[in-house]
Amino acid sequence: PASALESSLRRNFPGALSNSAIALRVASSLRNRGYTPTNTLFGSSLCSDEINDTAESLVGDFQNKLGVEGVFNLGGLGGLPFVGTSGMGAFTSHTPVDGKIFIVFGPHVGISNDGTVGKIERVGKESISTSCGAGIGAYKAIMAKDDSKEAEKEKTLGTKDFQEEYIISQLSDRLDALKGQEPSNESITYVTNKMYDLVWEMLRSEINTFTAKPDFWDNVSEVTLLGGIVVNRGHGAMEGVSGGEDFYQPLMLKSLTKEGENDVYGEIFGDFPALARPHRAALYV
């Protein structure tokens, strides 16, 4: 029988595959389309959390399978590309001559060994931990707010915690469906899906700033965007936690060229019934 973790994964993030399965399929497609170790610029917009930067992480797996040396880290808290247009400009300017760009992006969430969404066993810790702390922290802050405090939305973002403040400000109008509900696997799944929307909206805006310029395509032949949700599993030494690969629920796979946009999602994942189309399980999405 499936473990509590596996059952929760299938119920809340249908179609999620192991990192290695995702990387194998996507990297094979990229190689067939001419992505090589010397012409590929690799970027990621994932959360800063160290559990997304392990030996078995999705980014590390892509580096191995594509043979690329480094990765440009676009993501901050929650996976949002807080590098902005300045960072995106620096990143795209590193593209090899007639090169190709590959970006993997999305938020992350943990599932503990007992199947609780938003919790994770971490190395060296004796108690369960939150994942993603930024997204769930924002959710808790929004739910705790007095609705009459509209002035909060007008508050100027400070410098000490501006990334989290930005996430709170952007999520605040997207979680009305959760008001009055107790936190649950379903509500944290819903928040995670809304975090995905935030990451994609910001990334799309930054990318469009450059791809809309005619001279951008003088040096870049293709941009591939892989979007989804990273699902972390426990890596700690707590009793009963075996660890292992994390998972990724792919929600988007697009190819951008000078001629336009091409959806290649079905080509890579369409043979999986649960992935016949990008599918999100959150009840309110």
Image: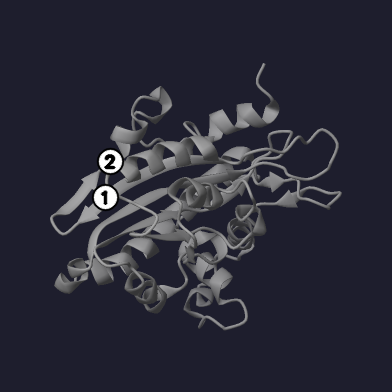
Disc 1 from disc 2: Cα separation: 7 Å
Relative image position of residue 1 (x, y in whole percent): 67, 16
Q: Quadrant of residue 93?
A: bottom left
What residue did someone put label 1 on? 255
Q: Amino acid at mark 2?
A: Val
Label 1 secondary element: strand
Relative image position of residue 66 (x, y in whole percent): 43, 49
The single residue placed furthest to the front in the displayed view is 38
Please tell me how crowded label 1 is: few (under 14), some (14-19), or many (20+) other residues with Cα within 10 Å: some
Relative image position of residue 117 (x, y in whole percent): 64, 41
Establish if 52 lies above or below 187.
Answer: below
Q: Quadrant of residue 207?
A: bottom left
Residue in the image at 58% along x and 33% along y: 9
Colour style of the rendered protein structure: one colour
What residue did someone put label 2 on? 264
In-front residue for pair 43/158: 43
In-front residue for pair 239/267: 267
Task: Check whether the beta carbons of the residues at disc 1 and disc 2 lie within 8 A of each other.
Answer: yes
Relative image position of residue 167 (x, y in whole percent): 52, 65
Left-right relation of 6 to 14: right
In-front residue for pair 142/164: 164
| Image quarter (top left, top right, bottom left or bottom right) of the C terminus | top left
Left-right relation of 151 to 28: right
Establish if 154 lies above or below 285.
Answer: below
Residue in the image at 33% along x and 40% along y: 29
Residue in the image at 45% along x and 73% along y: 83
Q: Quadrant of residue 101?
A: bottom left
How many numbered circles are shown?
2
Q: Amino acid at mark 1?
A: Ser
Q: Mark 1 vs mark 2: which is more N-terminal?
A: 1
